Image: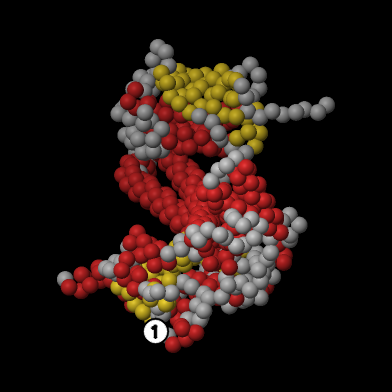
Amino acid sequence: METDKMEHSAAEDHVLVCLSASPTNAKIIRTAARMADAFKGAFTALFVETPDYAMMQEEDKERLHKNIRLAQQLGATVETVQGEDIAFQISEFARLFGVSKIVLGRSSTRRSFLFVRPSLTERITQLSPNLDIYIIPDQSVHSYKLQRRESYKFNRMDLWKSIAALIISTAIGFLFCILGFSEANIITVYILGVLIIAIITTQRIFSLVSSVISVLLFNFLFTEPLFSFNAYDTGYPATFLIMFIAAFLTSSLAAQIKWQARQSAKTTYRTKILFDTNRLLGNEKDFDGIISVTCNQLMKLLSKTILFYGTKNGVLTEPLWFPADSEQTILQYTTKKERTAAAWVLHNNKHAGATTNTFSDARCLYLSVRSGHDVYGVVGIAVDGDPLDAFEDSIVLSILGECALALKNEMISREREEAAVLAKNEKLRANLLRSISHDLRTPLTSISGNAGILLSSEENIGKEKRRQLYENIYDDSLWLINLVENLLYVTRIEDGTMKLRLTTELLDEVIEEALQHTDRRRVEHDIIVKPAEKFILVKIDARLIMQVIINIVDNAIKYTPKGSTIIIETAQKDGTAIVTISDNGAGVTDEEKTHIFDMFYVGGTKVADSRRSLGLGLALCKSIVTAHGGTIQVTDCKPHGAMFVFTLLTEEVTVYE
């Protein structure tokens, strides 16, 4: 009992590791992966994207991407969140997703101007006191310092926007001065100008510099003495300081709101992409449709060429090609080197190709479409030296996860259908064996008995009695032949091995030939054929349609008394041939009409001979007519009797003279 409890507790563990561009982050990821494997719990790697991410050096970004790929290769689910407070984002993610253990690297405390700032570990401990936090020591962690991008790209448009905003603010200030407004109103105008600069510019430096320039302009143009940076009033320095702080805070808040708006837009876009993908995948029921939707979504998202390799018996199939540029050719992405990288991904269930350490000289980045340890295919993304960023990588993995889930459901559905077909075939075989073993006994016994009498006492039996015995043997053998034919047709239809051999035939000739093979007792009935006024050509498998006519006519002979009339009529209407076979017997009850075409169904009507029907004839008729694209039904014949009507598609023949 205690062992079961421990296993249950371990199954609920969820290990979270935090991703960064630190050189020691790889060691932390590997340690977290070993912990997740030891606890047999879920493993998640979280990257918190802050505003500093856009200003990271390319070297740091590349190191971060390597750490993300390492986490993916070790089985982690990579997630990305945005925010400035890293500790808060980590604790909130842990709370929402049921994380029980967090693995961090050692982080040193930072001393600010007046106090010591709490470390990341201390902040997470304060925000999530119930979590187990594991600190991985490393001596080199203190030597790492995240550096900003050295090359700063100057934006001329932002410069002109800032100058224009300051000029307009100054002009409004002069207008307020002429109108006699107080200096507080002019200060407010400059703060508003700095806020507008923060909104309309793309780089934060312009709003920060504008905060300083706005204070200098106000001092130079609107304080005594004018046109100098001196101030007579002793309170002006405090005014300038408050003005600068207000402008600085306003610009900082505006820049932060812009960053948050961009992140919200990214999140909304990601949600929309995933929602559309999920909706489109939900509408697809087969393998090709699921792959087409997935690859088209990836192509729209990344604007890159996509390849998909399916799998069959553990080997990659020929790739499907989704080019982003119509001028590209598939040959450059399907070389031996590219296929080797894709095959490696299939067998190792890890990323490879461009921007990775495995087959890094490949042109495509190869990712497995997997659910757990099951790989359903390999996707190739033609990055061509342009690696995916953290946001794109997160969406791609989510889309591939949705694709894997859809493929898994499709495989389960297909296996369920195959199991249902097998079960149906097994049931059919069981019913056939049970019916055959029971119903073949009577005709075989009759044939054996009659043959035995003829062999032992032929000379002592009169001519008339011998003829009767011969006729009985003949009738029983014909019944057996017809039964075997029906069995063969039924089994071929049920297992899908029967192929239609369509030829153009004259319908009246098919009916005439079929009547030659009906029950010998047809001479005891009046069979009338009423052909249509015009010849009717149909494209059919003549052998099968003859079996339909034989079965229906034999059914009428069997269930109607001697001397009854059986009428076969043909007609043509709207490109359809209509065959009607009616009799004036007792007819079919309403209850029997609903089941008469079901396999193994035998009605309650008594027949003259001792042989039971297996209930295959009319079921076979329905299957054959349906396979020809027609319909079959039974109705009442006035004043009494049954009427079977089935339709066939006609064939038009053009005669050239």
Above or below, comparing residue 498 to residue 535 in the picture: below
Task: Where is residue 211? Give x, y as percent.
Answer: 57, 59
Q: Residue furthest right?
A: 657
Pinpoint residue 465: horizontal percent, then vertical percent. Answer: 37, 33
Nearer-the-camera pick, 430 or 584? 430
In the image, residue 119 sits, relative to residue 571, either above or below, namely below
Residue 451 lies left or right of residue 509; in this view the side is left
Q: From this viewpoint, is residue 41 visible?
A: no
**Image quarter in which the C terminus is found:** top right
Q: Is residue 416 above or below residue 101?
A: above
Identified at 35% across, 59% down, the residue is 96
Question: Circle 1 sits on which residue?
Answer: 137
> Foreground: 406 or 505?
406
Give the residue at the far bottom of this rendering. 139
SS at mark 1?
A: loop
* Figure quadrant of residue 490: top left
For the N terminus, which image quadrant? bottom left
What is the quadrant of residue 126 in the picture? bottom left
Residue 602 falls in image quadrant: top left
Neighbourhood count class around disc 1 (C-alpha, 10 Å): few under 14, some 14–19, many 20 upward:
some
Question: Given the current orientation, which residue lies at the most extreme left position?
Answer: 1
Foreground of the two, 363 or 242:
242
Is any part of residue 326 visible from this angle? Answer: yes
> Looking at numbered disc 1 in the image, what kind of residue is underneath it?
Pro
User: What is the number of callouts on the image?
Assistant: 1
